[in-house]
Amino acid sequence: MATPTAIRPPGLTINGRSVASAATLPVIDPSTGAPFIEVPSATPAELDEAVAAARAAFPGWRATPLRRRQELVASISDVVRAHLDELALLVTTEQGKPIGNARGEIGAALRQVDFLTGVTLDPEVIRDDEGAYVEVRREPLGVVGAITVWNYPVLVAMFKLVPALVAGNVVIVKPSPFTPVATLRLGELLQEVFPPGVLQVLAGDDDLGRALAEHPGVDKISFTGSVPTGKKVMASASGTLKRVTLELGGNDAGIVLDDVDPAAVGADLFWAGFSNSGQVCAALKRLYVPESRFDAICEAVAAEAATVAVGPGLQEGVKAGPVQNKPQLDRVRELTAGALAAGGEAFHTGEIPDGPGYWFPTTLIRGVAEGVPLVDEEPFGPVMPILTYRTVDEAVARANDTEYGLGASVWSPDLDRAVEVADRLVAGSVWINQHPVVTATVPFGGAKQSGIGVESSRHGLLEYTHIKVVNVKR
Ligand code: NAD
Protein backbone atom coordinates (compact mmCIF):
# COMPACT_ATOMS: atom_id res chain seq x y z
CA MET A 1 0.00 0.00 0.00
CA ALA A 2 1.31 3.46 -0.85
CA THR A 3 1.43 5.46 2.36
CA PRO A 4 2.45 9.06 1.77
CA THR A 5 5.29 9.57 4.24
CA ALA A 6 3.85 12.96 5.14
CA ILE A 7 0.82 11.31 6.75
CA ARG A 8 1.65 9.44 9.93
CA PRO A 9 -1.17 7.28 11.28
CA PRO A 10 -2.56 9.00 14.37
CA GLY A 11 -3.36 6.90 17.44
CA LEU A 12 -6.53 6.44 19.39
CA THR A 13 -6.81 8.87 22.28
CA ILE A 14 -7.47 6.96 25.50
CA ASN A 15 -7.01 8.48 28.93
CA GLY A 16 -4.79 11.28 27.67
CA ARG A 17 -2.43 9.11 25.64
CA SER A 18 -2.05 8.03 21.99
CA VAL A 19 -2.67 4.33 21.66
CA ALA A 20 -1.80 2.13 18.68
CA SER A 21 -4.36 -0.66 18.88
CA ALA A 22 -3.60 -4.26 17.93
CA ALA A 23 -6.32 -4.01 15.28
CA THR A 24 -6.19 -1.63 12.33
CA LEU A 25 -8.53 -0.13 9.78
CA PRO A 26 -7.50 0.80 6.21
CA VAL A 27 -8.70 4.20 5.02
CA ILE A 28 -9.27 4.85 1.33
CA ASP A 29 -8.53 8.05 -0.57
CA PRO A 30 -11.75 8.38 -2.62
CA SER A 31 -9.95 10.24 -5.40
CA THR A 32 -7.84 7.12 -6.09
CA GLY A 33 -10.04 4.36 -4.66
CA ALA A 34 -6.92 2.99 -2.91
CA PRO A 35 -6.05 2.80 0.79
CA PHE A 36 -3.57 5.49 1.86
CA ILE A 37 -3.18 4.72 5.55
CA GLU A 38 -4.00 2.18 8.27
CA VAL A 39 -5.28 3.61 11.53
CA PRO A 40 -5.81 1.82 14.82
CA SER A 41 -9.24 0.31 15.37
CA ALA A 42 -10.38 0.14 18.98
CA THR A 43 -11.00 -3.30 20.46
CA PRO A 44 -13.85 -3.98 22.93
CA ALA A 45 -11.26 -3.90 25.74
CA GLU A 46 -10.08 -0.46 24.58
CA LEU A 47 -13.66 0.77 24.56
CA ASP A 48 -14.06 -0.43 28.15
CA GLU A 49 -10.79 1.28 29.05
CA ALA A 50 -11.95 4.55 27.50
CA VAL A 51 -15.34 4.39 29.23
CA ALA A 52 -13.62 3.72 32.58
CA ALA A 53 -11.27 6.67 32.00
CA ALA A 54 -14.23 8.86 31.06
CA ARG A 55 -16.17 7.89 34.19
CA ALA A 56 -13.12 8.59 36.31
CA ALA A 57 -12.65 12.01 34.66
CA PHE A 58 -16.29 13.08 34.87
CA PRO A 59 -16.51 14.22 38.52
CA GLY A 60 -13.50 16.52 38.15
CA TRP A 61 -14.65 17.99 34.84
CA ARG A 62 -18.19 18.49 36.05
CA ALA A 63 -16.86 20.27 39.15
CA THR A 64 -14.67 22.54 37.02
CA PRO A 65 -16.38 25.95 36.87
CA LEU A 66 -18.11 26.72 33.57
CA ARG A 67 -15.78 29.66 32.89
CA ARG A 68 -12.71 27.43 33.26
CA ARG A 69 -14.23 24.74 31.05
CA GLN A 70 -14.91 27.42 28.46
CA GLU A 71 -11.31 28.65 28.66
CA LEU A 72 -10.06 25.16 27.89
CA VAL A 73 -12.61 24.68 25.11
CA ALA A 74 -11.55 28.08 23.69
CA SER A 75 -8.01 26.77 23.34
CA ILE A 76 -9.32 24.14 20.89
CA SER A 77 -9.38 27.03 18.40
CA ASP A 78 -5.73 27.91 19.02
CA VAL A 79 -4.59 24.31 18.63
CA VAL A 80 -6.70 23.66 15.54
CA ARG A 81 -5.67 26.94 13.87
CA ALA A 82 -2.01 26.10 14.51
CA HIS A 83 -2.56 22.77 12.68
CA LEU A 84 -5.09 23.94 10.11
CA ASP A 85 -3.02 22.97 7.05
CA GLU A 86 -2.35 19.49 8.40
CA LEU A 87 -5.98 18.85 9.40
CA ALA A 88 -7.34 20.22 6.11
CA LEU A 89 -4.99 17.94 4.17
CA LEU A 90 -6.23 14.95 6.16
CA VAL A 91 -9.87 15.90 5.52
CA THR A 92 -9.25 16.30 1.79
CA THR A 93 -7.31 13.05 1.54
CA GLU A 94 -9.84 10.91 3.39
CA GLN A 95 -13.06 12.71 2.43
CA GLY A 96 -12.26 13.94 -1.07
CA LYS A 97 -13.48 17.55 -0.88
CA PRO A 98 -11.41 20.40 -2.36
CA ILE A 99 -8.76 21.66 0.05
CA GLY A 100 -10.36 25.13 0.30
CA ASN A 101 -13.61 23.48 1.35
CA ALA A 102 -11.77 21.34 3.91
CA ARG A 103 -10.36 24.51 5.44
CA GLY A 104 -13.86 26.01 5.33
CA GLU A 105 -15.28 22.97 7.12
CA ILE A 106 -12.77 23.36 9.94
CA GLY A 107 -13.37 27.11 10.17
CA ALA A 108 -17.13 26.53 10.40
CA ALA A 109 -16.54 23.92 13.11
CA LEU A 110 -14.58 26.46 15.17
CA ARG A 111 -17.56 28.80 15.20
CA GLN A 112 -19.11 26.37 17.72
CA VAL A 113 -16.18 27.21 19.98
CA ASP A 114 -16.59 30.95 19.47
CA PHE A 115 -20.28 30.82 20.29
CA LEU A 116 -20.37 28.33 23.14
CA THR A 117 -17.44 29.80 25.05
CA GLY A 118 -19.57 32.92 25.51
CA VAL A 119 -22.76 31.37 26.88
CA THR A 120 -23.92 31.16 30.49
CA LEU A 121 -25.84 28.36 32.16
CA ASP A 122 -27.28 30.23 35.11
CA PRO A 123 -30.08 28.57 37.04
CA GLU A 124 -33.58 29.72 36.22
CA VAL A 125 -35.38 30.90 39.34
CA ILE A 126 -39.04 30.01 38.94
CA ARG A 127 -40.24 30.81 42.46
CA ASP A 128 -38.78 33.07 45.11
CA ASP A 129 -41.29 34.14 47.80
CA GLU A 130 -41.95 33.68 51.48
CA GLY A 131 -43.09 30.09 50.97
CA ALA A 132 -40.37 28.67 48.74
CA TYR A 133 -37.37 29.15 46.52
CA VAL A 134 -37.31 26.99 43.37
CA GLU A 135 -34.55 26.98 40.80
CA VAL A 136 -34.02 24.93 37.66
CA ARG A 137 -30.43 23.94 37.06
CA ARG A 138 -28.83 22.40 34.01
CA GLU A 139 -26.60 19.51 35.00
CA PRO A 140 -24.30 17.53 32.70
CA LEU A 141 -25.34 14.01 31.78
CA GLY A 142 -22.01 12.20 32.22
CA VAL A 143 -20.25 10.25 29.45
CA VAL A 144 -21.33 11.25 25.94
CA GLY A 145 -20.69 8.97 22.97
CA ALA A 146 -20.42 11.05 19.78
CA ILE A 147 -20.87 8.90 16.67
CA THR A 148 -20.10 10.74 13.44
CA VAL A 149 -20.40 10.42 9.67
CA TRP A 150 -18.10 10.81 6.69
CA ASN A 151 -19.34 13.90 4.83
CA TYR A 152 -18.00 16.55 7.27
CA PRO A 153 -15.83 14.55 9.66
CA VAL A 154 -14.31 17.40 11.65
CA LEU A 155 -17.37 19.63 11.64
CA VAL A 156 -19.75 16.91 12.83
CA ALA A 157 -17.35 15.88 15.62
CA MET A 158 -16.93 19.47 16.80
CA PHE A 159 -20.69 20.13 16.67
CA LYS A 160 -20.96 17.41 19.34
CA LEU A 161 -17.83 17.60 21.45
CA VAL A 162 -17.85 21.39 21.96
CA PRO A 163 -21.34 21.69 23.51
CA ALA A 164 -20.93 18.42 25.41
CA LEU A 165 -17.69 19.62 27.06
CA VAL A 166 -18.98 23.13 27.76
CA ALA A 167 -22.01 21.62 29.51
CA GLY A 168 -19.68 19.60 31.77
CA ASN A 169 -19.79 16.18 30.14
CA VAL A 170 -16.87 14.00 29.11
CA VAL A 171 -16.84 12.73 25.53
CA ILE A 172 -15.82 9.70 23.50
CA VAL A 173 -15.88 10.44 19.77
CA LYS A 174 -16.25 7.57 17.31
CA PRO A 175 -15.68 8.78 13.76
CA SER A 176 -16.96 6.99 10.67
CA PRO A 177 -14.72 4.10 9.57
CA PHE A 178 -14.59 5.84 6.17
CA THR A 179 -13.07 9.07 7.60
CA PRO A 180 -11.37 8.51 10.96
CA VAL A 181 -7.99 10.14 10.27
CA ALA A 182 -8.54 13.87 10.89
CA THR A 183 -10.69 13.13 13.96
CA LEU A 184 -8.02 10.86 15.45
CA ARG A 185 -5.43 13.54 14.82
CA LEU A 186 -7.70 16.14 16.44
CA GLY A 187 -7.92 13.87 19.49
CA GLU A 188 -4.13 13.65 19.67
CA LEU A 189 -3.71 17.42 19.31
CA LEU A 190 -6.22 18.09 22.07
CA GLN A 191 -4.49 15.80 24.56
CA GLU A 192 -2.50 18.85 25.68
CA VAL A 193 -5.70 20.82 26.34
CA PHE A 194 -7.93 18.57 28.43
CA PRO A 195 -7.30 16.41 31.51
CA PRO A 196 -7.00 12.67 30.69
CA GLY A 197 -10.34 10.98 30.01
CA VAL A 198 -12.25 14.21 29.29
CA LEU A 199 -12.02 13.91 25.49
CA GLN A 200 -11.18 10.59 23.88
CA VAL A 201 -11.32 9.39 20.27
CA LEU A 202 -11.79 5.78 19.25
CA ALA A 203 -11.82 4.78 15.60
CA GLY A 204 -13.56 1.59 14.60
CA ASP A 205 -16.23 0.02 12.49
CA ASP A 206 -20.01 -0.11 12.94
CA ASP A 207 -19.69 -2.76 15.68
CA LEU A 208 -17.73 -0.29 17.78
CA GLY A 209 -20.56 2.23 17.28
CA ARG A 210 -23.09 -0.33 18.44
CA ALA A 211 -20.95 -1.28 21.46
CA LEU A 212 -20.66 2.40 22.42
CA ALA A 213 -24.42 2.90 22.08
CA GLU A 214 -25.08 -0.18 24.22
CA HIS A 215 -22.37 0.46 26.81
CA PRO A 216 -23.78 0.73 30.34
CA GLY A 217 -21.09 3.29 31.23
CA VAL A 218 -22.29 5.77 28.59
CA ASP A 219 -25.08 8.24 29.43
CA LYS A 220 -25.88 9.85 26.10
CA ILE A 221 -25.36 9.18 22.41
CA SER A 222 -25.20 12.03 19.96
CA PHE A 223 -25.40 10.43 16.54
CA THR A 224 -25.20 11.72 12.99
CA GLY A 225 -25.87 9.31 10.15
CA SER A 226 -28.64 7.56 8.30
CA VAL A 227 -32.23 6.96 9.43
CA PRO A 228 -31.86 3.14 9.60
CA THR A 229 -28.72 3.42 11.74
CA GLY A 230 -30.36 6.08 13.90
CA LYS A 231 -33.14 3.61 14.69
CA LYS A 232 -30.56 1.00 15.70
CA VAL A 233 -28.80 3.54 17.91
CA MET A 234 -32.07 4.36 19.61
CA ALA A 235 -32.74 0.67 20.23
CA SER A 236 -29.22 0.16 21.62
CA ALA A 237 -29.54 3.23 23.83
CA SER A 238 -32.83 2.00 25.27
CA GLY A 239 -31.06 -0.67 27.35
CA THR A 240 -29.89 1.95 29.84
CA LEU A 241 -32.29 4.74 28.78
CA LYS A 242 -29.47 6.83 27.39
CA ARG A 243 -30.44 10.23 26.13
CA VAL A 244 -30.13 10.49 22.35
CA THR A 245 -29.74 13.25 19.84
CA LEU A 246 -30.19 11.88 16.33
CA GLU A 247 -29.23 13.95 13.29
CA LEU A 248 -30.38 11.80 10.38
CA GLY A 249 -31.01 11.89 6.68
CA GLY A 250 -33.27 14.09 4.62
CA ASN A 251 -34.90 14.39 1.24
CA ASP A 252 -35.27 18.14 1.24
CA ALA A 253 -37.65 19.75 -1.21
CA GLY A 254 -37.25 23.24 -2.61
CA ILE A 255 -40.26 25.03 -4.09
CA VAL A 256 -39.63 27.76 -6.65
CA LEU A 257 -42.58 30.16 -6.90
CA ASP A 258 -43.72 31.54 -10.24
CA ASP A 259 -42.37 35.05 -9.63
CA VAL A 260 -38.67 34.12 -9.50
CA ASP A 261 -36.14 35.40 -11.96
CA PRO A 262 -34.43 32.16 -13.06
CA ALA A 263 -31.13 33.84 -13.86
CA ALA A 264 -31.05 35.36 -10.36
CA VAL A 265 -31.47 32.05 -8.51
CA GLY A 266 -29.87 29.47 -10.85
CA ALA A 267 -26.45 29.41 -9.20
CA ASP A 268 -27.85 29.34 -5.66
CA LEU A 269 -30.25 26.53 -6.56
CA PHE A 270 -27.40 24.55 -8.03
CA TRP A 271 -25.14 24.89 -4.99
CA ALA A 272 -28.08 24.16 -2.67
CA GLY A 273 -28.04 20.68 -4.13
CA PHE A 274 -24.41 20.12 -5.07
CA SER A 275 -22.24 21.58 -2.35
CA ASN A 276 -19.84 18.87 -1.03
CA SER A 277 -20.75 16.85 -4.16
CA GLY A 278 -24.33 16.57 -2.88
CA GLN A 279 -23.18 14.78 0.27
CA VAL A 280 -24.99 17.08 2.66
CA CYS A 281 -27.79 15.86 4.92
CA ALA A 282 -29.82 19.00 4.30
CA ALA A 283 -28.92 19.49 0.65
CA LEU A 284 -31.69 20.37 -1.76
CA LYS A 285 -32.65 16.95 -3.11
CA ARG A 286 -35.91 17.59 -5.01
CA LEU A 287 -36.60 20.86 -6.78
CA TYR A 288 -40.24 21.76 -7.57
CA VAL A 289 -40.65 24.33 -10.33
CA PRO A 290 -43.87 25.77 -11.83
CA GLU A 291 -44.43 24.72 -15.44
CA SER A 292 -44.21 28.36 -16.57
CA ARG A 293 -40.64 28.65 -15.29
CA PHE A 294 -39.45 25.09 -15.85
CA ASP A 295 -37.26 25.42 -18.95
CA ALA A 296 -35.70 28.67 -17.76
CA ILE A 297 -34.87 27.25 -14.31
CA CYS A 298 -33.39 24.08 -15.80
CA GLU A 299 -31.25 26.23 -18.09
CA ALA A 300 -30.08 28.50 -15.25
CA VAL A 301 -29.17 25.60 -12.94
CA ALA A 302 -27.36 23.79 -15.77
CA ALA A 303 -25.42 26.98 -16.59
CA GLU A 304 -23.92 26.94 -13.10
CA ALA A 305 -23.36 23.17 -13.26
CA ALA A 306 -21.29 23.72 -16.40
CA THR A 307 -18.78 25.79 -14.39
CA VAL A 308 -17.98 22.95 -11.98
CA ALA A 309 -14.69 21.11 -12.37
CA VAL A 310 -14.79 17.72 -10.64
CA GLY A 311 -11.46 16.24 -9.60
CA PRO A 312 -8.99 15.44 -6.80
CA GLY A 313 -9.32 17.89 -3.93
CA LEU A 314 -5.70 19.03 -4.12
CA GLN A 315 -5.89 19.94 -7.80
CA GLU A 316 -6.02 23.62 -8.66
CA GLY A 317 -9.42 24.87 -9.83
CA VAL A 318 -11.40 21.85 -8.67
CA LYS A 319 -14.79 22.78 -7.21
CA ALA A 320 -16.13 19.30 -6.40
CA GLY A 321 -14.52 16.07 -5.29
CA PRO A 322 -15.48 12.41 -5.65
CA VAL A 323 -18.23 10.55 -3.86
CA GLN A 324 -16.67 9.58 -0.54
CA ASN A 325 -17.06 5.81 -0.63
CA LYS A 326 -17.87 2.92 -2.92
CA PRO A 327 -21.24 1.89 -1.39
CA GLN A 328 -22.43 5.50 -1.72
CA LEU A 329 -21.16 5.69 -5.31
CA ASP A 330 -23.02 2.48 -6.13
CA ARG A 331 -26.18 3.92 -4.63
CA VAL A 332 -25.93 7.16 -6.60
CA ARG A 333 -25.33 5.17 -9.78
CA GLU A 334 -28.29 2.91 -9.09
CA LEU A 335 -30.71 5.77 -8.32
CA THR A 336 -29.59 7.66 -11.43
CA ALA A 337 -29.85 4.62 -13.70
CA GLY A 338 -33.30 3.91 -12.25
CA ALA A 339 -34.45 7.46 -13.02
CA LEU A 340 -33.20 7.22 -16.61
CA ALA A 341 -34.84 3.82 -17.04
CA ALA A 342 -38.10 5.36 -15.80
CA GLY A 343 -38.01 7.90 -18.65
CA GLY A 344 -35.97 10.65 -17.00
CA GLU A 345 -33.68 12.84 -19.08
CA ALA A 346 -30.18 13.77 -17.86
CA PHE A 347 -30.17 17.28 -19.28
CA HIS A 348 -26.76 18.04 -17.80
CA THR A 349 -23.98 15.51 -17.28
CA GLY A 350 -20.59 16.91 -16.28
CA GLU A 351 -17.08 15.63 -16.91
CA ILE A 352 -15.18 13.38 -14.51
CA PRO A 353 -11.50 12.42 -14.37
CA ASP A 354 -10.39 9.25 -16.12
CA GLY A 355 -9.15 6.36 -14.06
CA PRO A 356 -9.87 5.03 -10.61
CA GLY A 357 -11.53 6.99 -7.83
CA TYR A 358 -15.17 7.23 -6.85
CA TRP A 359 -16.15 9.68 -9.58
CA PHE A 360 -19.69 10.54 -10.51
CA PRO A 361 -20.52 13.35 -12.92
CA THR A 362 -22.61 16.31 -11.82
CA THR A 363 -26.02 15.22 -13.08
CA LEU A 364 -29.32 17.10 -13.45
CA ILE A 365 -32.42 15.07 -14.27
CA ARG A 366 -35.90 16.06 -15.44
CA GLY A 367 -38.91 14.11 -16.67
CA VAL A 368 -39.35 12.12 -13.44
CA ALA A 369 -41.81 12.38 -10.55
CA GLU A 370 -42.73 10.69 -7.29
CA GLY A 371 -42.68 6.91 -7.51
CA VAL A 372 -39.15 6.98 -8.92
CA PRO A 373 -36.59 6.15 -6.18
CA LEU A 374 -34.34 9.08 -7.15
CA VAL A 375 -37.22 11.37 -6.12
CA ASP A 376 -38.55 9.40 -3.15
CA GLU A 377 -35.24 8.48 -1.52
CA GLU A 378 -32.12 10.33 -0.48
CA PRO A 379 -29.38 10.14 -3.16
CA PHE A 380 -26.68 11.88 -1.03
CA GLY A 381 -24.53 12.47 -4.09
CA PRO A 382 -24.09 14.76 -7.12
CA VAL A 383 -27.45 14.15 -8.82
CA MET A 384 -30.68 16.14 -8.48
CA PRO A 385 -34.13 15.79 -10.05
CA ILE A 386 -36.04 18.90 -11.12
CA LEU A 387 -39.81 18.36 -11.11
CA THR A 388 -42.76 20.38 -12.38
CA TYR A 389 -45.87 21.42 -10.45
CA ARG A 390 -49.12 23.15 -11.36
CA THR A 391 -50.38 24.71 -8.10
CA VAL A 392 -48.60 25.71 -4.91
CA ASP A 393 -51.01 23.52 -2.90
CA GLU A 394 -49.90 20.55 -4.96
CA ALA A 395 -46.21 21.40 -4.54
CA VAL A 396 -46.59 21.72 -0.76
CA ALA A 397 -48.43 18.39 -0.53
CA ARG A 398 -45.77 16.65 -2.59
CA ALA A 399 -42.91 18.26 -0.64
CA ASN A 400 -44.44 17.06 2.64
CA ASP A 401 -45.29 13.57 1.41
CA THR A 402 -42.21 11.89 2.88
CA GLU A 403 -41.04 10.32 6.13
CA TYR A 404 -38.15 12.77 6.14
CA GLY A 405 -38.38 16.27 7.60
CA LEU A 406 -34.90 17.74 7.75
CA GLY A 407 -34.97 20.93 5.66
CA ALA A 408 -36.97 22.60 2.92
CA SER A 409 -36.84 25.86 1.00
CA VAL A 410 -39.03 28.36 -0.81
CA TRP A 411 -37.71 30.61 -3.54
CA SER A 412 -39.42 33.92 -4.39
CA PRO A 413 -38.63 37.65 -4.37
CA ASP A 414 -41.96 38.15 -2.53
CA LEU A 415 -40.88 37.30 1.01
CA ASP A 416 -44.39 37.42 2.53
CA ARG A 417 -45.60 34.96 -0.04
CA ALA A 418 -42.57 32.73 0.51
CA VAL A 419 -43.11 32.72 4.28
CA GLU A 420 -46.76 31.73 3.77
CA VAL A 421 -45.58 28.67 1.86
CA ALA A 422 -42.86 28.01 4.46
CA ASP A 423 -45.57 27.95 7.16
CA ARG A 424 -47.05 24.87 5.49
CA LEU A 425 -43.85 22.85 5.08
CA VAL A 426 -43.05 20.22 7.71
CA ALA A 427 -39.31 20.37 8.39
CA GLY A 428 -36.78 21.20 11.08
CA SER A 429 -35.60 24.20 9.03
CA VAL A 430 -37.26 26.06 6.18
CA TRP A 431 -35.00 28.43 4.32
CA ILE A 432 -36.14 31.26 2.06
CA ASN A 433 -34.03 31.95 -1.05
CA GLN A 434 -31.20 29.81 0.36
CA HIS A 435 -30.65 26.16 1.24
CA PRO A 436 -29.12 24.84 3.49
CA VAL A 437 -27.71 27.22 6.09
CA VAL A 438 -26.30 25.59 9.22
CA THR A 439 -24.47 27.76 11.74
CA ALA A 440 -23.32 27.59 15.35
CA THR A 441 -25.92 30.06 16.58
CA VAL A 442 -29.09 28.62 15.03
CA PRO A 443 -30.67 25.30 16.07
CA PHE A 444 -30.58 22.57 13.45
CA GLY A 445 -32.42 19.26 13.56
CA GLY A 446 -35.01 17.14 11.86
CA ALA A 447 -38.78 16.74 12.06
CA LYS A 448 -40.39 13.31 11.50
CA GLN A 449 -37.82 10.56 10.83
CA SER A 450 -35.01 13.00 10.11
CA GLY A 451 -34.08 13.01 13.76
CA ILE A 452 -34.64 13.74 17.40
CA GLY A 453 -33.37 16.92 19.02
CA VAL A 454 -31.19 19.67 17.61
CA GLU A 455 -27.58 20.72 17.43
CA SER A 456 -26.08 24.22 17.59
CA SER A 457 -27.29 27.26 19.52
CA ARG A 458 -28.32 27.28 23.15
CA HIS A 459 -30.99 24.67 22.31
CA GLY A 460 -28.30 22.27 21.16
CA LEU A 461 -26.19 22.95 24.26
CA LEU A 462 -29.11 22.12 26.55
CA GLU A 463 -29.40 18.66 24.95
CA TYR A 464 -26.20 17.79 26.81
CA THR A 465 -27.84 18.55 30.15
CA HIS A 466 -30.67 17.31 32.30
CA ILE A 467 -32.90 19.49 34.44
CA LYS A 468 -32.32 19.38 38.16
CA VAL A 469 -34.75 21.27 40.35
CA VAL A 470 -33.69 22.56 43.75
CA ASN A 471 -36.85 23.25 45.71
CA VAL A 472 -36.43 24.95 49.10
CA LYS A 473 -39.27 25.21 51.63
CA ARG A 474 -39.08 28.46 53.56
P1 NAD B 1 -24.28 5.43 8.80
O1 NAD B 1 -25.54 5.66 9.52
O2 NAD B 1 -24.06 4.16 8.10
O3 NAD B 1 -23.01 5.60 9.77
C1 NAD B 1 -22.83 6.71 10.62
C2 NAD B 1 -22.02 6.27 11.83
O4 NAD B 1 -22.73 5.29 12.56
C3 NAD B 1 -20.67 5.65 11.52
O5 NAD B 1 -19.73 6.13 12.47
C4 NAD B 1 -20.93 4.17 11.72
O6 NAD B 1 -19.77 3.41 12.04
C5 NAD B 1 -21.89 4.19 12.89
N1 NAD B 1 -22.74 3.00 13.02
C6 NAD B 1 -23.14 2.13 12.08
N2 NAD B 1 -23.95 1.18 12.60
C7 NAD B 1 -24.09 1.50 13.91
C8 NAD B 1 -24.84 0.93 14.97
N3 NAD B 1 -25.60 -0.15 14.80
N4 NAD B 1 -24.79 1.52 16.19
C9 NAD B 1 -24.05 2.63 16.38
N5 NAD B 1 -23.31 3.21 15.41
C10 NAD B 1 -23.33 2.65 14.18
O7 NAD B 1 -24.10 6.68 7.86
P2 NAD B 1 -24.19 6.75 6.28
O8 NAD B 1 -25.49 6.19 5.84
O9 NAD B 1 -22.97 6.28 5.66
O10 NAD B 1 -24.24 8.37 6.19
C11 NAD B 1 -25.06 9.08 5.38
C12 NAD B 1 -26.32 9.53 6.10
O11 NAD B 1 -26.01 10.46 7.16
C13 NAD B 1 -27.26 10.26 5.19
O12 NAD B 1 -28.57 9.77 5.40
C14 NAD B 1 -27.17 11.69 5.64
O13 NAD B 1 -28.29 12.48 5.33
C15 NAD B 1 -26.94 11.54 7.10
N6 NAD B 1 -26.38 12.77 7.68
C16 NAD B 1 -27.15 13.52 8.53
C17 NAD B 1 -26.67 14.72 9.06
C18 NAD B 1 -27.51 15.58 9.97
O14 NAD B 1 -26.96 16.43 10.66
N7 NAD B 1 -28.83 15.41 10.01
C19 NAD B 1 -25.38 15.14 8.72
C20 NAD B 1 -24.62 14.36 7.87
C21 NAD B 1 -25.13 13.17 7.35
Image (tube, grey):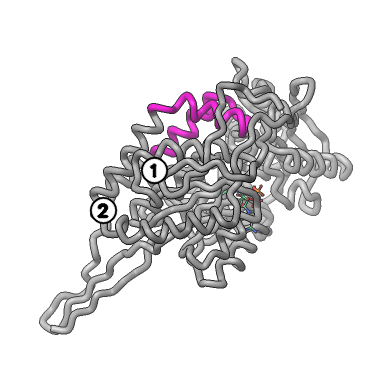
Label 2 is placed on what type of residue?
Leu
Label 1 is placed on what type of residue?
Gln
Q: Is residue 53 magenta?
A: no
Residue 334 in sight: yes
Disc 1 crowd, CA 10 A, few/some/many (<14, 14-19, 20+) = many
Query: Which residue is located at x 75 percent, y 21 percent?
Result: 353
Q: Measured from the top left, where is residue 306 in percent x and y?
A: 69, 22
Between 433 and 39, the one nearer to me in the picture: 39
Q: Which mark is residue 376?
A: none
Q: CA distance from mark 1 to mark 2?
A: 16 Å
Q: Which residue is mark 1?
A: 112
Residues under numbered marks 1 and 2 in contact, where contact means CB atoms less than 8 Å apart? no
Q: Which residue is mark 2?
A: 66
Task: Write down the region rendered in magenta.
Answer: 82-111
Residue 5, quarter of the rendered image: top right
Query: Disc 1 or 2, which lies upstream in sequence?
Result: 2
> In the picture shown, does residue 86 fall above or below 177?
above
